[in-house]
């Protein structure tokens, strides 16, 4: 089944807005884990506007009590970010091509421009014993280029799918993602996905077989406020359990 990794950035953002450690990020990680999620994600940006480096250390320590629950740290590979990954040693590091101060992730890597840079970064991540994933648009050329690198997984950037959902182009867009995912798997890459997935659009997306992990935070947090954590996480886990095997 597809693993559900909950992104805690919005919990961290709420905490930071009041200048004290409430809500506590580790406490919320524990709540989500108790409900059955298989992963925790954070994206510490240079301005520390939500998740911070300290959150990475705290979550790594907390997850030692939860074997089988993975920590995924995502972000742009600055020297500070790479040093954090090398020290914390999360289960997975997802490389995202965000500019400093960028509001949110909005595109995947272009291997035609950044292959040499990414090869150096990926070598450092693997030397630390951390599994790598690279944020990628559903572009078969980029998938092929990623497979020629040492990346172990890709994370398909799914805003395009979410934006097209329930529009006239929805089937064609989903087919594009399916083609990219199928090619990635055929080339030996694991496939993750994330960005703007929610309880409404996730079931159709997970008709694509073999999606290893979805990372969901912003909408999931809103859904938890509206419907309650227990109900929302049960619904997500039920959807993830239906992903076709390969």
Image: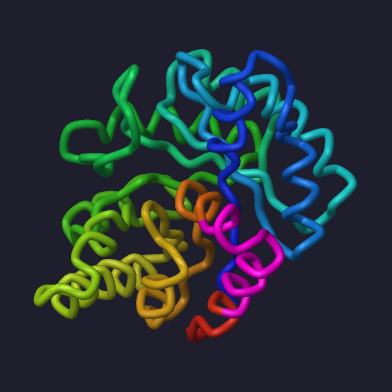
Q: Which residue is found at the position 78% from the left and 58% from the top?
A: 68
Check residue 231 for magenta coloring: yes
Q: As displayed, is residue 159 above or below residue 104? A: below
In this rendering, the count of numbered labels is 0
Q: Which residue is found at the position 62% from the left and 18% from the top?
A: 18
Residue nearer the viewer, 131 or 61: 61
> Which color scheme did the rendering employ for the protein?
rainbow
Check residue 50 for magenta coloring: no
Q: As displayed, is residue 79 above or below residue 225? A: above
Residue nearer the viewer, 137 or 6: 6
Q: Position of residue 107 (x, y in %)?
A: 24, 42
Q: Which residue is found at the position 37% from the left and 78% from the top?
A: 208
Per the picture, the main secondary structure of the magenta-coloured stretch is helix
Q: Is residue 153 left or right of residue 112?
A: right
Q: Residue furthest left?
A: 168
Bounds of the magenta span? Answer: 223-238
Q: Which residue is found at the position 55% from the left and 36% from the top?
A: 9
Q: Position of residue 200 (x, y in %)?
A: 40, 72
Quadrant where the N terminus sits is: bottom right
Q: As displayed, is residue 33 above or below residue 171? A: above
Residue nearer the viewer, 77 or 175: 175
Q: Is residue 11 left or right of residue 120?
A: right
Q: Position of residue 141 (x, y in %)?
A: 16, 56
Q: As displayed, is residue 67 above or below residue 186? A: above
Q: Residue furthest right?
A: 65
Q: Quadrant of residue 33?
A: bottom right
Q: Is residue 245 left or right of residue 137?
A: right
Instruction: Examine the rendering and report whether any part of residue 163 can be seen.
Output: yes
Residue nearer the viewer, 76 or 121: 76
Instruction: Examine the rendering and report whether any part of residue 73 can be seen.
Output: no
Q: Position of residue 168 (x, y in %)?
A: 10, 77
């Amino acid at each position: 089944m597809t693993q559900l990794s909950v992104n805690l950035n919005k919990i961290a953002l709420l905490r930071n807005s009041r200048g004290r450690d409430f809500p506590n990020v580790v406490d919320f990680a524990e709540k989500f884990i108790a409900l059955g999620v298989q992963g925790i994600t954070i994206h510490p940006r240079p301005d520390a506007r939500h998740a911070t480096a300290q959150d990475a250390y705290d979550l790594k320590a907390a997850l030692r009590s939860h074997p089988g629950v993975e920590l995924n740290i995502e972000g742009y590979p600055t020297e500070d970010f790479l040093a954090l990954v090398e020290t914390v040693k999360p289960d997975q590091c997802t490389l995202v091509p965000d500019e400093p101060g960028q509001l949110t992730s909005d595109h995947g890597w272009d291997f035609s421009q950044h292959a040499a840079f990414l090869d150096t970064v990926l070598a450092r991540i693997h030397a630390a014993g951390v599994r790598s994933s690279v944020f990628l648009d559903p572009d078969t050329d980029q998938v092929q280029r990623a497979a020629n690198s040492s990346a172990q997984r890709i994370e398909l950037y799914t805003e395009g799918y979410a934006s097209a959902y329930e529009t006239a182009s929805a089937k064609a867009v989903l087919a594009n993602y399916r083609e990219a995912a199928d090619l990635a798997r055929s080339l030996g890459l694991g496939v993750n996905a994330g960005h703007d997935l929610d309880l409404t659009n996730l079931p159709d997306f997970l008709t694509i077989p073999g999606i290893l992990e979805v990372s969901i935070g912003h909408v999931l947090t809103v859904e938890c406020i509206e419907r309650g954590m227990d109900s929302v996480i049960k619904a997500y886990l039920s959807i993830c359990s239906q992903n076709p095997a390969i």
